[in-house]
Image (cartoon, grey):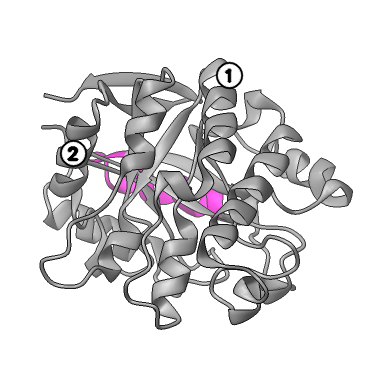
C-alpha cells in the first residue's frame, strides 16, 4: 500500500524544534512514497503568541529541500487553526493565499479561550460536554472559512489526546458524546466535498493492548464520507508515519473507500484495499 504521511511539523511550527530536513531524512529511511508538511498557521492563540509561522520562509526552505530530495514526493501544506475568531479570520485567509499550497488541514486547538491540553478546558463540564464543546467550536470556525482554502478537517478527537496527557488515561472520544454536533459537522464537509483526517497522535496515548475507538469515523462514512487523509502529527522524527498500518486497518473497518493525497489542493484517490 502507498505509504504517505499528511500531517508533519517542523521547527517552523511554534511547538516544534525539529528541522525540516530531519523529518525528510526519517521519511527516506522508512522508504515512504510521499509526505506533506503541515506546519501550524495559528492566529490569536495565547500559548503561541509572538511565535506565529513565517509562511514565506517556510515555503522557501521547503522548495530548497524538495530540490535536494527528488526521490521522495513532497507536498507543501499548512494546518490552519480555524478557531482564531472573526477578528482574525481575514488575516488567516490572507496567509493561506501567500504561497501556492498543495494541502490545508482545517483544525481547532484553542476553543473558548483555552485548549484541551489545559485543565481549564474541562472545568465545569463533564467529559461528554467537553467533547461537544470542542466539536461545536471547530464547526463554528469552519463555517467562517472559504471552502476553497482547505482540504480536510483535522483531529476531531483532539480532546482525547489532551485529556489523556493531563492524566485521564481512560478518556475515549466516542461518537455518542457529541452525536448531533458531529453529524452537523460531517454533513457540512461532505456537502463541501472535503474529508476527515485520521490523526494517529491520539492513539499514541493508548495503553498496551487497548484498541482504538473510531465509531465517529464509521458515522462519517454513513453520512456519505468516502475518503480520508492519514497523518501522524509528528513533531519528532520518531513519530513520522507511526501507526500507519493501524490507521489503514481502522479506515477499512470503518468502511472508508479511499485514502487521499493532494497536489495543488486537489485530491488523488487511492483505494483502500
Circle 1 sits on which residue?
Answer: 192
Question: Looking at the image, which residue is at 65% across and 40% down?
Answer: 139
* Residue 128 part of the magenta-drawn span: no
Question: Which span is picked out in magenta?
Answer: 58-73
* Residue 64 part of the magenta-drawn span: yes
Residue 175: image x %, image y %? 42, 44
Residue 152: image x %, image y %? 49, 34
Circle 2 sits on which residue?
Answer: 248
Q: CA distance from mark 2 to mark 1?
A: 24 Å
Q: Is residue 20 above or below residue 82?
A: below
Is 123 left, or right, of 230 in this rendering? right
Is 243 left, or right, of 192 in this rendering? left
Q: Depth check: 182 or 22 in front?
A: 182
Mark 1, Cα crowd under 10 Å, few <14 / some 14-19 / many 20+, is: few
Disc 2 + disc 1, Cβ < 8 Å? no
Is 162 left, or right, of 21 in this rendering? right
Q: Depth check: 102 or 137 in front?
A: 137
Q: Is residue 71 visible in this depiction of the protein?
A: no
Question: Looking at the image, which residue is at 57% across and 33% down?
Answer: 185
Q: Depth check: 55 or 227 in front?
A: 227
Residue 253: image x %, image y %? 17, 33
Question: Looking at the image, which residue is at 40% across and 55% down?
Answer: 173
Q: Is residue 2 above or below residue 106?
A: above
Mark 1 falls on what kind of element? loop
Main structural element of the magenta stretch: helix, strand or loop?
helix
Question: Looking at the image, which residue is at 27% across and 51% down?
Answer: 213
Q: Is residue 160 above or below residue 174?
A: below
On the image, which quarter does residue 235 sit in? bottom left
Mark 2 falls on what kind of element? helix
Q: Earlier in the sequence, mark 2 or mark 1?
A: 1
Amino acid at each position: 500500500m502507498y505509504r504517505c504521511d499528511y500531517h508533519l511539523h517542523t521547527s517552523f511550527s511554534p511547538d516544534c524544534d525539529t528541522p525540516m530536513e530531519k523529518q525528510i531524512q526519517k521519511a527516506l529511511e522508512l522508504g515512504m512514497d510521499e509526505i506533506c508538511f503541515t506546519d501550524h498557521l495559528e492566529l490569536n492563540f495565547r500559548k503561541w503568541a509572538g511565535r506565529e509561522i513565517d509562511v514565506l520562509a517556510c515555503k522557501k526552505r521547503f522548495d530548497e529541500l524538495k530540490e535536494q530530495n527528488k526521490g521522495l514526493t513532497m507536498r507543501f501544506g499548512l494546518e490552519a487553526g480555524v478557531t482564531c475568531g472573526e477578528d482574525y479570520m481575514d488575516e488567516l485567509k490572507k496567509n493561506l493565499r501567500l504561497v501556492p499550497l498543495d494541502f490545508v488541514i482545517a483544525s481547532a486547538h484553542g476553543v473558548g479561550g483555552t485548549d484541551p491540553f489545559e485543565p481549564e478546558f474541562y472545568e465545569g463540564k463533564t467529559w461528554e460536554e467537553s467533547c461537544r464543546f470542542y466539536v461545536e467550536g471547530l464547526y463554528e470556525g469552519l463555517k467562517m472559512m472559504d471552502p476553497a482554502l482547505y482540504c480536510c478537517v483535522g483531529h476531531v478527537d483532539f480532546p482525547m489526546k489532551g485529556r489523556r496527557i493531563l492524566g485521564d488515561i481512560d478518556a475515549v472520544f466516542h461518537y455518542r458524546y457529541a452525536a448531533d454536533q458531529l453529524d452537523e459537522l460531517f454533513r457540512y464537509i461532505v456537502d463541501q466535498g472535503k474529508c476527515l483526517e485520521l490523526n494517529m497522535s491520539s492513539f499514541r496515548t493508548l495503553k498496551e493492548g487497548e484498541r482504538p475507538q473510531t465509531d465517529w469515523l464509521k458515522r462519517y462514512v454513513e453520512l456519505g464520507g468516502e475518503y480520508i487523509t492519514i497523518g501522524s502529527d509528528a513533531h519528532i522524527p520518531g513519530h513520522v508515519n507511526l501507526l500507519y498500518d493501524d490507521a489503514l486497518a481502522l479506515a477499512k473497518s470503518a468502511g472508508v473507500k479511499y485514502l487521499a493525497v493532494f497536489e495543488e489542493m486537489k485530491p488523488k484517490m487511492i483505494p483502500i484495499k
